[in-house]
Amino acid sequence: MKKIYIALLGFGTVGAGVYRVVTENHALIEHREELDIEVKRILVKNFDSEPNINMAPREVFTTSIDDITNDPDISIVVECMGGVEPARTFILAALNGKKTVVTSNKEVISKHWYMFADTARKNEVGLYIEATVGGGIPLLRTVTDSLQANNIEQVMGIINGTTNFILTKMSEAGQDFGETLREAQELGYAEADPTADVEGFDATYKLSILSSLAFHTHMPIDVIHREGITKLTSEDFHAARQLGYEIKLLAIGKKTENRVEVRVHPTMIPKTHPLASVRESFNAVFIKGNAVDDVMLYGRGAGQMPTASAVMGDVIYACHHEGKHRLGTFRNIPDMDQGTILVRDWQSKYCIRTRVADQPGVLSKIAGVFAKHNVSLNSVLQFAQKEGEKGPIAWITFLTHTAQELAVQAAVEELNTLDCMESVESLIRVEE
């Protein structure tokens, strides 16, 4: 039986979940894996403000990272603090202390992965990050250990449970964004400050990690196009229903040869698409490989025990692989590799919802602008009319055929200059 001592950095939701898995499933792990895993140290900020302090014996707690990095018995350090600092400093200290690191911290990995990978390599220790994307879904190891014979051409998925919960409620209950956000906060799905989720930062961190592994080239967060969900309205969902779509916040990565596009934004997808049925806080990722074709992984994308499951999967994997696994053999550098071409003028279909003056000739003027920019219209829907301050107004929604991103943006900019245009109320990309 192999004895393994681990340390936890942080004892909040995820840290406490990891401790639960280690203790509650200890006999099971011993039987299946022939590993006797014990939490020897838990790093906390202070003893008085830790809500889970009574879950473990008091003697295992410490407020000094040195108690962990200087302990020769501890071989694996699990970082589950979240945020960038002090997590970054502590991860580097652990790696330099010859400890393998397992982390669920997507923000610090997406911003400093290259630094950690280099430090782990120099010290001949491991770096494991499965829990950073998809919570309990075995996503990253599927990409690196099961699909490695494939040229992965596309990843597309719902990788933020908070926004998916909000969008599900807006779609099914007809609630507005503010009302649904308050409900998500009351239920614990959204933080008091929900910016990271609703503005798409969380999904961007995760897409950076996932696309880097899938496409075998580093995709930094600053090259990812990002839009959140805060501007969506009930009218957008009404238009989507009329057109046969659902609206999801999707993380999308596509690769053709050395050309890569990476983007996070609200997206309309057909109701028949597998991702359209992913509800509430669940996550799902759709992967397309040139050999395997289509694969979808679905499950709990966050939460104490699903994330702890992924963390402990990494801990056990590290125990069996001598702690030298660092995920990915691509050039993990601070910036994008010079051999990779970032596509900013991607192709998509678009749903454009407008408010216009209800008068003769409006449609022909708008159609003329689209035609000028080589944007072909698939369908036109008029939803409502009413009397406005300047006369009758109408809401018209346009669904385009596949078009270039920059051409559509230029067309929308010109539409806003038309005398008959009250406003372009929304532009939502469409993926089939």
Image: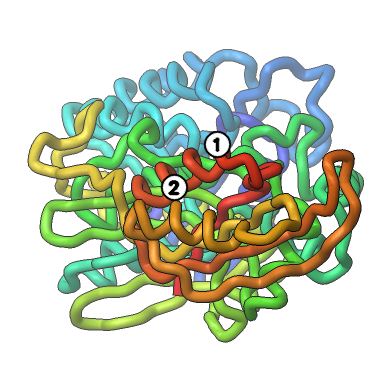
Query: Left of 200 or right of it: where is 2?
Result: left
The extreme front residue here reads 360
* Closest to the observer, 301 or 366: 366
Q: Residue at x 75, y 57 (%)?
A: 358
Give how far apart the Cα atoms at labels 1 and 2 are. 10 Å
Q: Residues within 10 Å of mark 2 (few under 14, many from 20)?
A: many
Instruction: Tell me the element at label 1.
Output: loop
Q: Quadrant of residue 59?
A: top right
* Closest to the observer, 49 or 414: 414
Residue at mark 2: 411
Residue at mark 1: 417
Q: Position of residue 300 (x, y in %)?
A: 63, 64
Residue 3 appears in the rendering: no
- Quadrant in which the C terminus appears: bottom left
Query: Left of 395 or right of it: where is 406?
Result: left
Instruction: Tell me the element at label 2.
Output: helix
Q: Residue at x 90, y 48 (%)?
A: 179
Q: Position of residue 419 (x, y in %)?
A: 63, 40
The kind of residue on which mark 1 rests is Thr
Q: Residue at x 38, y 59 (%)?
A: 371
Colouring: rainbow
The extreme left residue here reads 339
* Closest to the observer, 302 or 260: 260
Query: Left of 236 or right of it: where is 137?
Result: left
